[in-house]
Amino acid sequence: MSYAVEPWQLRWQGLSVDHLHQTESTFALSNGHIGMRGSLDEGEPRGLPGTYLNGFYEEHQLPYGEGGYGYPEAGQTVVNVTDGKIIRLLVEDEPLDMRYGNAIEHERTLDFRSGTLRRRTVWESPTGRRVTVRSERLVSFTQRAVAAIRYEVEPMDDLQLVVQSDLLANEPNKSRSSDPRVAAALDSPLVNDFTMAEKTRAVLCHHTKVSGLRMAAAMDHEIDVDGVDTRTEIRAEDDLARFTAAVDVPAGGCLKLTKYIAYGWSGQRSTPALRAQVEAALAGACQTGWEGLLQEQREFLDDFWEVADIEIEGDDQLQQAIRFALFHILQAGARGESRAIPGKGLTGPGYDGHAFWDTEMFVLPVLTYTVPDAARDALRWRHSTLDKARERAKVLGLKGAAFPWRSINGAECSAYWPAGTAAFHVSGDVAYATQQYLNATGDEDFDRDEATEILVQTARLWLSLGHHDPHDGFRIDGVTGPDEYSAIVDNNVYTNLIAQQNLWAAADAAERNACDATEEEIAAWRRAADAMSVPYDEMLQVHPQADNFTKHAEWDFENTPQDKYPLLLHFPYFDLYRRQVIKQADLVLAMHVRGDAFTDEEKARNFAYYEARTVRDSSLSAGTQAVLAAEVGHLGLAYDYLVEAAFTDLHDLHENVTNGLHMASLAGAWTALVAGFGGMRDHGGELTFAPRLPEELTRFSFRMSFRGTRISVDVSESGATYRIVDGTELTTRHHGEQITITAEAPVTMPLPEAPDLERPKSPFGREPRRH
């Protein structure tokens, strides 16, 4: 795949049908509520068409060869809803199809500043008629239920043009699942409830067969052909509404079609109410107009880039990739508004549209320090699912709240116990993100209304899951940490440290705000946290990932062919579970988020030990490894991991971009730069920095927000300069030295010399991917 290297956009020239699956993901538009894959206007040729509404899913049975107590019964899969993107063109009587005729020029551009996907095509029909087609598509950040398309056609000669604009439900789609239960659930999942078409407007309302969710989609149109008369008609049936306009356009003239689309869904509201909602949204969009929607989109993004932009000098490809990552993270969470942020955002059907712990530990830190309202809304979704989390804990014989490994509506739908239910750390991850947001914003309303209950309920889980032991304090046994190649272990260090912070934070919150926790319960949380077991291997002088991990047999990396990765697809889990082979950063992640629990010497030894055993069969890993590599002084290795995280999707490193982008890896690129080379840490609510400059770059800068103050950190060979972008004053630390930045007085500090360390060994054949 080959994109033009440009700082503020992603542009693809020419048409490669073989790459449509990937470009539909990279060119996807979303606002966190509506997601539209970047398919061609004509609908065909196509890779994997997709339009998604956050939280809208169909239910199906989960597959079990052998059932067991506590196994989740119902799976959830995101639905490809009514497609409003389709605009077909007939030149005389020949349909524009990029596979036929001659595409003399063709390019598509995702613009990170305008928030739109543009297309320009010069097409010659099989009979030699030539037209220039331009389109621009947006999913509005400001009008949450609205998307819009401007479609323009200029003929070279006097031609009759016909445009057809569709709403298409139950779009034919090749099954993406080998499970017949899922395939059946997604075979025409929408049942029609209402159809309307009049003048230039149409509405289709549907519901899902099993989950019973209702949705409505509507479209309206404006057409302009420089005063030439236009013949239009509109019609609708159960799964299709079509607006058609026919017009004779003179050479040099231009047909302009503006299409406004609105979506809504609900599990409670009636079909008439949803119809009213989408018609009202359409009315608002038409009142704003195309130019108004463009202006609103630009202003929204101007504000985002002021607080979130990252500048890089010395690597133009990386500059583009970092902004691509930030743009898609914004799209995933900006207007989710109390819905989950799925692992693939709304860019594709990968992971069945489920949200994982990725959201809290990778995506939310980016949003917390750039768009904190979006982070708050994502945490409110977790809070809204507490009843389901409490019920899940009860089924498991536990107290408090056990948040699901994977879900759309808050109920657990992972069919694999060791890497699903046993990954209790997800409850600590939710608590971690909650406390991180509170520390970064000081949001007292959220603290009182939602955060305290989240922290209290998750603390109760740990107290019922763990136990005090006379040998080594408070133990948490039989869990799976972030590394899914080690399952059902005792005292996973990451889990224990995230639980420890959870328990302390819950005790503080319960003393700060009114809740149902007793003094005895609060004291018990503090005792457990203070006595938390953190295993240490005295002989090797490293922390084992979990009890006895460093005693396991080593994996034979040198005799594992490259085509046998990822290992989980080629080796039995039992063999992975009993060896020192790591899918993704686990203890290394613990050293990032709980760096306050390790000495500098322990971090350096631990990092080298786990670097030699981590194969990165997960897209989550590279960003975290970059952070610790930079902290302990392996700047070249950190840079390689930053590059890998940033290009995971643009270069399709895991060969699955077809099903959507990896939100956590995109967020990992931000983390690698800001927390890695910027050295940003927020332990205990104190914001600190320890920047270092890799030799591959001449300069980098990043921006972020903390407690309402927007700052920039600019790093070059001459030092690090801290500035206030919006606000009055901020006190922080630079490599341990306290500094105070004011609006009038930026602060420049020297960069200490990085240690001269030997590059640690990576597993044979699994070195980080370079450019």
Image (cartoon, rainbow, N blue to C red):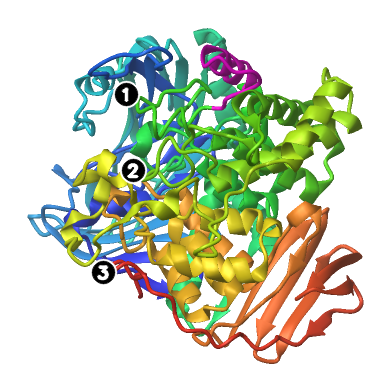
Res. 143 in view: no
First of labels 3, 2 by sequence position? 2
Front: mark 3 or 2: 2
The residue sitting at the bottom extreme is: 718
Amino acid at circle 2: Tyr
Q: Is residue 393 magenta?
A: yes
The CA span between labels 1 and 2 is 44 Å
Q: Residues within 10 Å of mark 1 (few under 14, many from 20)?
A: many
* Label 1 residue SS: loop
- In the image shown, does 213 or 66 lie closer to the viewer? 66
Q: Is residue 560 magenta?
A: no
Q: Quadrant of the C terminus?
A: bottom left
Q: Position of residue 206 (x, y in %)?
A: 40, 14
- In the image shown, does 421 or 259 lie closer to the viewer? 421
Q: Which residue is mark 3?
A: 765
The stretch of residues the image draws in magenta is 386-403
| Residue 95 relative to residue 80: left or right | left
Residues at circles 1 and 2 in contact by the CB criterion of under 8 Å: no
Q: Which residue is mark 1?
A: 169
* Label 3 residue SS: loop
Q: Is residue 167 above or below residue 686?
A: above
Front: mark 1 or 2: 2
| Residue 373 relative to residue 412: left or right | right
First of labels 1, 2 by sequence position? 1
Res. 573 in view: yes
Q: Which residue is mark 2?
A: 577
How many numbered marks appear?
Answer: 3
- In the image shown, does 629 or 573 lie closer to the viewer? 573
| Residue 592 relative to residue 440: left or right | left
Amino acid at circle 3: Gly
Q: Residue at x 62, y 65 (%)?
A: 675
Q: Quadrant of the N terminus?
A: bottom left
